[in-house]
Image (cartoon, coloured by chain):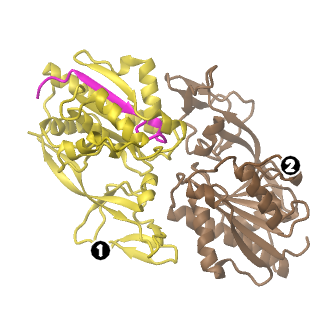
Chain colours: A yellow, B brown
Amino acid sequence: MSEINKVTIVGGTHGNEFTGVYLVKKWQQQPAEVTRSSFTTSTLWANPKAHEQNKRYCDQDLNRQFTRAQLDDVNLVGYEQSRAKIIDAELGPKGDAKCDFVIDLHTTTSNMGPCLLLTQQGKIYRQLAAYVKMQMPEAVIFRDEDHLSAAQHHLLATVGTYGVIVEVGPVPQSVIRQDVLEQSAELTRHILDFIEHCNLGTLPTLPQQVEGYRYLESIKLPVDANGQRLGMVHNHVQDNDFKPLHPGDPLFMTFAGETITYQGADTVYPAFINEAAYYDNNLAMSLLEKVVIDVE
Amino acid sequence: MSEINKVTIVGGTHGNEFTGVYLVKKWQQQPAEVTRSSFTTSTLWANPKAHEQNKRYCDQDLNRQFTRAQLDDVNLVGYEQSRAKIIDAELGPKGDAKCDFVIDLHTTTSNMGPCLLLTQQGKIYRQLAAYVKMQMPEAVIFRDEDHLSAAQHHLLATVGTYGVIVEVGPVPQSVIRQDVLEQSAELTRHILDFIEHCNLGTLPTLPQQVEGYRYLESIKLPVDANGQRLGMVHNHVQDNDFKPLHPGDPLFMTFAGETITYQGADTVYPAFINEAAYYDNNLAMSLLEKVVIDVE
């Protein structure tokens, strides 16, 4: 791995996730907390307009606009599609980026605790995962669609050479919780410390393996022929992010009072359970498998 | 108390409080659950347009538009100001209402559990409080600005002769939780049963006294001279709705890391702690006093 010279911490990619907005504002005023000796740290408030409107986004989800093809498509002229091009010019261009490492701050309404989302495979990510788990054992390592190439990945964090998402919950949209804000700040500090250790060659001895979860698929709420929702996430699943869901377990409760069970063949581990932002597409949760990551 | 002939259950007064919207839709399809022998029950989806936009309101908070003066002011022409006039024509006119009893369904992001909000004083409310506590001991009785006359009260629930709010949390905005939906439905059922018992003269023997909380005032987040927020609700208070807050207890944590303590003279009981919808006005929470309600 070559040296990391430029790190950017991004907040407010989603306008109603207040935690990242306030952390970025704080670190703009008090940069010492995110300053390290071996690289420069900058901050970026990705979507102030959506925050002003107290919405996730104005026109499109900004965190779905960063495939190389989307960035190159001049016909994509929506507000967030335009913001993505500007951020690509600022931090990228994706594929040959000025920014070496992007940390994008997000929150969720789901009970996921502090999560480190890895968008790519590679030794630096495996070592980061191991380092973070050493420093913050309660953190969860989440491998998010890391089968895609960076060019195909639509997340903002993939605009730099390396990139991760700090994803912490539960917190309602448009709310700041002290606990979630502090967990987000702590996880960010560990990532910055890891990069510093890498640059200086001072990484401590890491464990050989670390536990994580790998994204498999998203599943939808039950809907009728007109797309009207017929039910909700079952109490059995609600708040149980990263807990096992076995074939035959209760999954949804219809408004008529019937339980719908999980029909998959294997035990899976849900996350983003009942996330508010996913209602737009009737997504109920993501399903993950538990994995062991070999660090070396 | 004269007989209650017409009851209206209102949902979706706030567009991003999904629970009431889905309960009203359900009861429109399955009216048996809210039907009783001695009165008619109708349902009203108060603000479908705000729900379509996934916002609390389009122009103004609909649940602040129901003073008699506002309803009579033809110069108030915003969307919710107009909806209020239409609802007044449908259920009111306030002060001489067609609807005898309004049950308005709300949710909160705060950890308030199932709450019955009483907007007026009077024997029927005291008896209702006692009956609800008998049937659902975990329910909280919340006397909300009941020093105002009905004409001065701006809440939708005051448009009928009698009216209460069913307020349940915690649930993020734009989310349906099975537990919160079921608590809302249960509390509504007890209110309907109470009205049925009143009409039929079959009320069970009620306790002589019932515990509740009475609204005192709302307090604001710390802000600077430009109105920018300087801090957040302290971990010590977060999620501790209806728990005592003593003079000198931690109240806010500034983003700079300083604790701000509660400076009031008396122990109070906060509610609506860190409610998402109150950020617009920088309201941090409501303060209440614990009261004993003499039922007779």
Rendered location of residue A79, percent (x, y): 43, 40
Q: Eyeballing the image, is A284 above or below A121?
A: below
Q: Nearer the viewer, residue B89 or B161?
A: B89
Residue B167, which numbered label? none
Q: Could you tell whether B30 is left or right of A257 in the image?
A: right
Taking the spot 45% from the left edge, 70% from the top edge, the residue there is: A227
Q: Work out which quarter of the rendered image holds the C terminus of chain B and state it.
A: bottom right
Element at label 2: loop
Q: Could you tell whether B262 is left or right of A274 in the image?
A: right
Element at label 1: loop
Pointers 1 and 2 within a single chain: no
- What residue sits right under mark 1 in the picture? A263
Mark 2 falls within which chain?
Answer: B
Rendered location of residue A192, percent (x, y): 27, 26
Q: Eyeballing the image, is A161 above or below B130?
A: above
Rendered location of residue B170, percent (x, y): 55, 53
Disc 1 from disc 2: Cα separation: 57 Å
Mark 1 falls within which chain?
Answer: A
Say if the magenta span includes residue A258.
Answer: no
Q: Amino acid at mark 1?
A: Gln
Taking the spot 80% from the left edge, 69% from the top edge, the residue there is: B206
- What residue span does the magenta drawing correspond to? A1-19
User: In which quarter of the view is residue B254 placed?
Assistant: top right
Taking the spot 25% from the left edge, 22% from the top edge, the residue there is: A6
Q: Nearer the viewer, residue A259 or B31?
A: B31
Q: Could you tell whether A265 is left or right of B283 in the image?
A: left
Residue B211 visible to an observer of this rendering: no
- What residue sits right under mark 2 in the picture? B73
Tag in front: 1 or 2: 2
